[in-house]
Image (tube, rainbow, N blue to C red):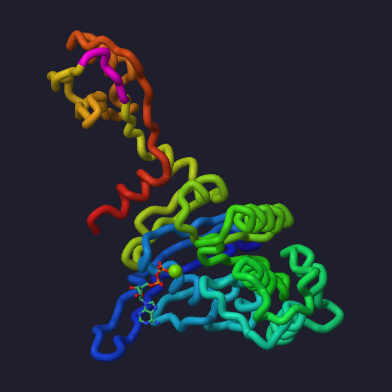
């Protein structure tokens, strides 16, 4: 039994430069393993290489070098089995305008060699909420319906792994909730999910594990809980009763006064207690009207890891 749904070793991709542009190293030696059964988040700023990585997994982009195994099948040794193990919902809405949703699913099933008796087009249309549009002209489908159809297409061959590239970028809340409900349901049925997203709170909520990519390199890879725990910087925000001047604070505490006059005291929770911070404020004879704290979230982790690189 293999433990990882996907194994990537020293994966590199260099795009040849076109029209005089220099070649682009989009992936610079990625090592990554994605455990079976997880919902795995691939995060990173625009241009980090997320789509390149996903499109290599999907067999849509040729890697320059490295090793990719999908469900235990080496892409170079068993290209057919490795492709059959994964379904990809791409970032672009590339649909053939001449096919209705039902036809599009049947054509896709044909491409993947799914025998007619094993096709589940109606079931999939139901899952993605397109039953009533099964025979509609593709050009009459809204953007949200097209995205749902792309999800359906990714599922026709019953893959072990479902990969979604920015599935919720620019979609409305209703569709977002429907997509996530589908993803959760598929995951509960045993499907491994890999997704990229720009919405950090979404990754925080959905993903068991996360890899952060920046400039073609993995800069962090951990469980979501661990990543959030790794940043123990806290900020205590104190509204003083009267305008306060900057005062001396003990080592390990950083004091700033924001434009509205609130004191922002930043400290490491593992080294300095909240009580010590309050003590420092009281020692400066500041009368406290209100106190609140700010916790780090995934956004802080992300910024810290991708800043100025
Ligand atoms: P992401 O999905 O994280 O935004 P991409 O994988 O789309 O990043 O792009 C990574 C880098 O590779 C970017 O600098 C992008 O401009 C470049 N790139 C992507 N596709 C191509 C291509 N077909 N030809 C040349 N450069 C490309
Ligand atoms: Mg992308």
Residue at x 49%, y 41% (from the top left corner): 225
On the picture, is 136 further left or further right than 258? right
> Height in image: 30 above or below 228?
below
Location of residue 186 in the rendering, given as x and y in whole percent from the top left corner: 70, 58
Location of residue 287 in the rendering, given as x and y in whole percent from the top left corner: 26, 10
35, 279: nearer the viewer: 279
Task: Report the quarter where the C terminus lies.
Answer: bottom left
Residue at x 31%, y 65% (from the top left corner): 215
On the picture, is 184 further left or further right than 287? right
Residue at x 59%, y 75% (from the top left corner): 73
On the picture, is 107 further left or further right than 13? right
**Residue 72 in view (yes/no):** no
145, 66: nearer the viewer: 145
Residue at x 50%, y 56% (from the top left corner): 41
**Magenta region, main secondary structure:** strand
Q: Residue furthest front?
A: 140
> Height in image: 214 above or below 221?
below
Residues drawn in magenta: 237-242
Location of residue 252 in the rendering, given as x and y in whole percent from the top left corner: 21, 26
> Height in image: 52 above or below 22?
above
Location of residue 198 in the rendering, given as x and y in whole percent from the top left corner: 45, 57
Q: Quadrant of residue 147?
A: bottom right
Q: Quadrant of residue 50?
A: bottom left
269, 154: nearer the viewer: 154
């Amino acid at each position: 039994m293999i433990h990882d749904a996907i194994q990537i070793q020293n994966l590199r991709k260099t795009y040849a430069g076109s029209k005089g542009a220099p070649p682009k190293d989009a992936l610079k030696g990625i090592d990554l393993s994605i455990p079976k059964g997880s919902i795995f988040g691939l995060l990173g700023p625009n241009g980090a290489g997320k789509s390149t990585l996903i499109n290599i997994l999907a067999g849509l982009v040729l890697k320059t070098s490295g090793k990719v195994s999908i469900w235990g099948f080496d892409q170079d040794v068993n290209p057919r089995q490795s492709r059959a193990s994964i379904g990809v919902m791409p970032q672009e809405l590339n649909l053939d305008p001449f096919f209705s949703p039902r036809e599009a699913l049947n054509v896709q099933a044909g491409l993947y060699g799914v025998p007619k008796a094993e096709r589940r087009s109606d079931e999939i249309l139901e899952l993605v909420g397109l039953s009533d549009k099964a025979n509609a002209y593709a050009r009459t489908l809204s953007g949200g319906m097209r995205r749902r159809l792309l999800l359906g297409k990714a599922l026709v061959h019953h893959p072990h792994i479902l990969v979604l590239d920015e599935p919720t970028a620019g979609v409305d809340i209703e569709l977002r909730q429907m997509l996530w409900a589908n993803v959760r349901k598929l995951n509960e049925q045993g499907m491994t999910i890999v997704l990229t997203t720009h919405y950090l709170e979404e990754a925080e909520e959905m993903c068991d594990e996360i890899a952060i990519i920046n400039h073609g390199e993995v800069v962090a890879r951990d469980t979501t809980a661990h990543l959030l725990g790794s940043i123990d910087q806290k900020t205590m925000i104190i509204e003083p009763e009267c305008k306060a001047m900057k005062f001396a604070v003990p080592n390990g505490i950083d004091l700033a006064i924001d434009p509205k006059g609130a004191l922002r005291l930043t400290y490491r929770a593992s080294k300095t207690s909240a009580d010590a911070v309050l003590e420092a404020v009281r020692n400066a004879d500041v009368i406290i009207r209100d106190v609140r704290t700010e916790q780090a979230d995934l956004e802080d982790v992300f910024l810290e890891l991708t800043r100025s690189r």
